[in-house]
Every structure is written in structure tokens, then in C-alpha cells.
Amino acid sequence: MDLLQLKDKNVVVMGVANERSIAWGVAKQLFAVGANVLFTYRKERSLTKLEKMLEKYDYTAKAIIQCDVNDDASIEEAFQRVKEEVGVVHGLVHSVAFANPSDLRDDFIHTSRDGFAFALDTSAYSLVAVSKAIRPLMTEGGSIITMSYLGAERVLDGYNIMGVAKAALESSVKYLANDLGEDGIRVNAISAGAIRTLSAKGVPSFNDILSKIEETAPLRRNVTQEEVANMSIAMLSQLSTGVTGEIVYVDGGYNIMGV
Ligand code: NAD
């Protein structure tokens, strides 16, 4: 029995920069279950890497499309291309975030007006913009997932403006879930544990965060890219049709601890 029902479904994956990217972990599992994967990328560098990775693993993408989430025209063009390629979309993986590195180095109070707006625009508003763009393509219902982090709820050293952006992202998930529910479209966030990726390099205290999780989390270890990908597959699939507007933790249970 095919419990997932993702075979031949069209899923857009945003945010693969390299093999360590959470989005790449999700894409690998999507290929494994027979989904059609359409990628979006921002920089040419990511495109070159992505093409090499696809060749290495012998995967064929349905499409690879440029999309800068800071730019409405780029989003419109990208989803027009998605429409031309597949017509109907069943899933969207939003795995995109960015803040000025300088805003993560100093105390939060020194966040600049521009830095605040840029982080929120890239990391939270982008979900609203791409959900709006993909809604008309999810004519058979669908599932949208995004990646969040515990810094949305708790003060984590060095996470600063990104924590505020993740709080906005998680709240946006709930409002979007309410708007899109009538179309049979679900919207959920996965609050992933700390994973060593390109983005994580921008968080100055990242090594300390990894050690603390190992000491304190109920599972006494950090989670893997594959574990986050597996929950992503569940949230994109028929296994989670009753779930929307949720923040699902894949963090070894770290979020339940008092310290
Ligand atoms: P990553 O650097 O591999 O991925 C981030 C992606 O965002 C990159 O592909 C980058 O090109 C893309 N991006 C940034 N600005 C963009 C723009 N303007 N337009 C289009 N794409 C843009 O790092 P990752 O850790 O895989 O991050 C993916 C998501 O997971 C992010 O939302 C991140 O905050 C979240 N997350 C990461 C961790 C972790 O510890 N790594 C934990 C929880 C949540």
C-alpha cells in the first residue's frame, strides 16, 4: 500500500545551496518516493552546484528555475514557469532564510532598520509571497512546509534578528493555514534542530548550541538532515492530511527542556 501517495506528485523545492542544505535532504527523499521535483535557486553558484549534485546522484529534476524571494517580479516569473512545466502543484518546500551577518554578530539591540526589514522580508514575508503565487496552481489541494527554529520562541545567543524573523514566519504559517484551508491547502512549519549547513555558519555560537543540545536534549544528540527530511515527507504526504497551521519539532525533544 502506498501510504504517502507522493508518487508522480509535483513538488517545488526552494533553498538548495549545497549537499548540506535541509532542502537537499528533502529533495533526496522526494526522489526516493517517486515525486517530480522542481527546484528553485537564487544564485548561479547554487545552480552549478545543484546540477552537479543531480548528476552525482543520478536524479532528474522536472525543472530548475531561478527565483529570488526578495523580488516580486522574480517570484511571478518563477511560478509562471512552474505553471508552464507542470500545471498543477501538490507540494512546496520553503527552505529559505537570510539575515545580514553583521546583525548576528552584535547584540540584538543594535539591529539596523534595514537589517531588520531585510531579514523579515527574506525569511518570513517570502513564505507569504510564494504561497500566494502557488495557490492558483494547487488546484487539487496541497501542502506547504517551511523551516523554522526554536529561536522564534526563545532567546538563543547570536540568533538575534533571525529569531524575530522566525517568530513572524511561524505566525504567518498560522494565518496562511487559515486563508488556504478552504482550498484544501495545508501550511505547516518544521522547527528543525541545529544542523551544520551554510546558513548555520552565520550563527556565531553554533558550536556551543550543538554541544548544549547533546548534553540536554531528551535524545542526548543532535538531529540529522535526513530526520528533518523524513518529517518533511510526512508533512507533504497523505499521512498528515488532518494537520495544518502547526509547528512540528524535529529536534530530539530539545524544545521541551527548561534549560
Ligand atoms: P542553506 O544555507 O543550505 O539554505 C538556505 C537557502 O536560502 C539557500 O539555498 C539560499 O540560496 C536561500 N536563500 C537565501 N536568500 C534567498 C533569496 N533572496 N531568494 C531565494 N533563496 C534565498 O541552510 P539551511 O540550514 O538548509 O537553511 C534552510 C532553512 O532551514 C532556513 O530557513 C533555515 O533558517 C532553516 N533552519 C536551519 C537550521 C539549521 O540548523 N541549519 C535549523 C532550523 C531551521
Image: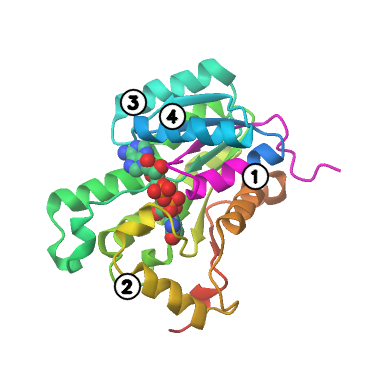
Q: Residue at x 31, y 48 (%)?
A: 98
Q: Residue at x 54, y 64 (%)?
A: 249
Kindly state the secondary structure of the residue where label 4 is placed.
helix
Say which mark, if any, is on residue 133. 4
Residue assigned mark 1: 29
- Measure the alpha-carbon separation of dots 3 and 4: 11 Å
Q: Amino acid at mark 3?
A: Ser
Residue assigned mark 3: 74
Query: Dot 2: within a 10 Å radius of its alpha carbon, few (fewer than 14), some, or many (20 or more) residues?
Result: few
Tell me where residue 9 appears, x and y as whole percent: 67, 31
Q: Amino acid at mark 2?
A: Val
Residue assigned mark 2: 155
Ligand 1 within 8 angstroms of badge 3 C-beta: yes
- Measure the alpha-carbon separation of dots 1 and 3: 27 Å
Q: Amino acid at mark 4?
A: Ala
Q: Amino acid at mark 1?
A: Gln
Tell me where residue 218 appears, x and y as whole percent: 58, 80
Magenta segment boundaries in residue numbering: 1-29
- Measure the alpha-carbon separation of dots 4 and 2: 33 Å
| Mark closer to the observer (3, 4) | 3
Disc 4 + disc 2, Cβ < 8 Å = no
